[in-house]
Amino acid sequence: MDTSHARKRSAVGLPAASEVAVALPDKRPRGRPRKTVAERDDGNRRVELVHAAARLFRRKGFDGTSTRDIATAVGMHSGSPFYHFKSKGALLYAVMDEGMRSATLRQTAALELASAAKPDAAALLRVLVRNHFDILLGPGSDFIPVMLYESRSITARQRTSLAKLQSDYESVWQPVLQALSEQGRLGCPVKLARLLIFGALNWSAQWFDAKKGASLDELTDAAIALFIGDDPKPPARRVRP
Amino acid sequence: MDTSHARKRSAVGLPAASEVAVALPDKRPRGRPRKTVAERDDGNRRVELVHAAARLFRRKGFDGTSTRDIATAVGMHSGSPFYHFKSKGALLYAVMDEGMRSATLRQTAALELASAAKPDAAALLRVLVRNHFDILLGPGSDFIPVMLYESRSITARQRTSLAKLQSDYESVWQPVLQALSEQGRLGCPVKLARLLIFGALNWSAQWFDAKKGASLDELTDAAIALFIGDDPKPPARRVRP
DNA sequence: CCTACCGATCGGTAGG
DNA sequence: CCTACCGATCGGTAGG
């Protein structure tokens, strides 16, 4: 995990004009030192911006975050984010796009891994739910909450693109829910079940506190038990004695 | 339902200065006509402001709504809302406070009404869920969504007051959930069940569309079936043949 | 990516 | 509740 966006540019930049005093004699290699290729500006300043934006958009909302806030968070000056993104809205969309793609990839991988054990549908749902909680509440989990709670601020065109990504994410769940429904363990139509279940999970972003209350494992147990009943499931494993 | 906030004040106000030409001779009863007592300004301009604020805060968010937007919505000029509320944040809190009090009152009344029939806990849960959907998605239902999705913008002190009101609302549900839990129909601890159920319900504010898809009755059936299983429940009643 | 800046908008207030 | 206004802040841009 890259945490380099914590450094402040100004701390290693040129001295302020006021410190340079009058005019320097015209030596050749003066001014801003040319960066050796890919030394500082290896192009993932863009990635840093997206991460900082995700964190701030989540904490203060899109409208409550200024592009200056974001610039400051990565040690840039106020106009510089617009060198990387043509607008504040483009930054928001980048957060959402990255969040959705990464979430779908993680779920697909988790499902593939779990499939080796020939699990039943309930076990697969458990995998999806547990992963969903991790995506939503785990470390560095600002992207999906922003996606969920700031979608009001994207354009119609962006909304269309995002709907495609959301549908990709849903389609990972679809066969699992379908199987459970056919086993009579869902209690209501698949489509409504998906919406209600996503709601129950997504809402946790509003109240979950990693430092107290249930763990993500306990949360997963509770959700599965609530949705598909008290069927075969491992005894509640508690980490602390 | 009062819809008078749709009228524009300017349409019945004084002509603009440019239309009055030079100086009028000093007749006595000129200028703004004195309103007969309680004719226009019967003090519920405040209520209109809260309603307009609720609608706008929901549609555009707190930070995305200007006090000028709200003033315009009720036919006031830009500074006038501050005659009724000392700040924009006070308006937000008024929306949330009103929303929570009204929700708790409605649920308490519904529960009292239903209790006449000596219903079991599942039937009571159905009443609460159905009412919750109505509060959240029915006509004029902007207050609770604002409360749910804009709480980031209130002060710590306001948050404390609001927590009390939220706890009042939860305590209406508590005995019902407790009873279901004791009957072994909940599948997980009451506290987690409440959080997950509220999540499933509250999330509907993000996707529910009154003009298509399930009705509130169907939604209620689905939610109950998902949470407490396929137990005694009336056959799904469809309005359309 | 910085510097310097622009026009627009915002919450809020004084004084009537 | 209106009028007239203020200082602050905002997204964004030109020009380097």
Image (cartoon, coloured by chain):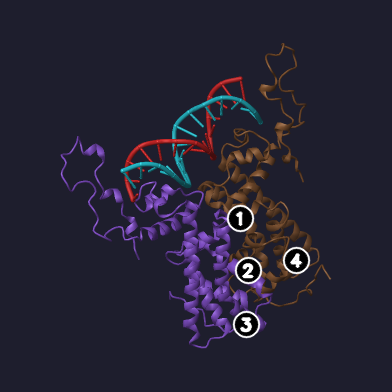
Chain colours: A brown, B purple, C cyan, D red
The amino acid at mark 4 is Asp
Q: Nearer the viewer, residue A75 or A157?
A: A75
Foreground disc of the pair 1, 4? 4
Percent across and percent down for residue B41 are 31, 58
The residue wearing badge 2 is: B195
Can residue B237 be spotted in the picture? Answer: no
- Asked if marks 1 and 4 fall on the same chain, the answer is yes
Image mark 4: chain: A
The amino acid at mark 3 is Ala
Q: Residues within 10 Å of mark 1 (few under 14, many from 20)?
A: some
Residue B159 falls in image quadrant: bottom right
Q: Which mark is residue A217?
A: 4
Disc 3 to disc 4: CB gap under 8 Å: no
Spatial separation of the CA atoms under disc 3 and disc 2: 17 Å
Disc 3 to disc 2: CB gap under 8 Å: no
Per the image, label 4 sits on a secondary structure element best described as helix
The amino acid at mark 2 is Leu
Q: Residue furthest right?
A: A241
Can residue A222 be spotted in the picture? Answer: yes
The residue wearing badge 3 is: B179
Q: Residues within 10 Å of mark 4 (few under 14, many from 20)?
A: some
The residue wearing badge 1 is: A166
Percent across and percent down for residue A49 are 66, 40
Per the image, label 1 sits on a secondary structure element best described as helix
The amino acid at mark 1 is Gln
Per the image, label 2 sits on a secondary structure element best described as helix
* Mark with earlier residue (1, 4): 1
Percent across and percent down for residue A11 are 73, 32
Percent across and percent down for residue B143 are 48, 62
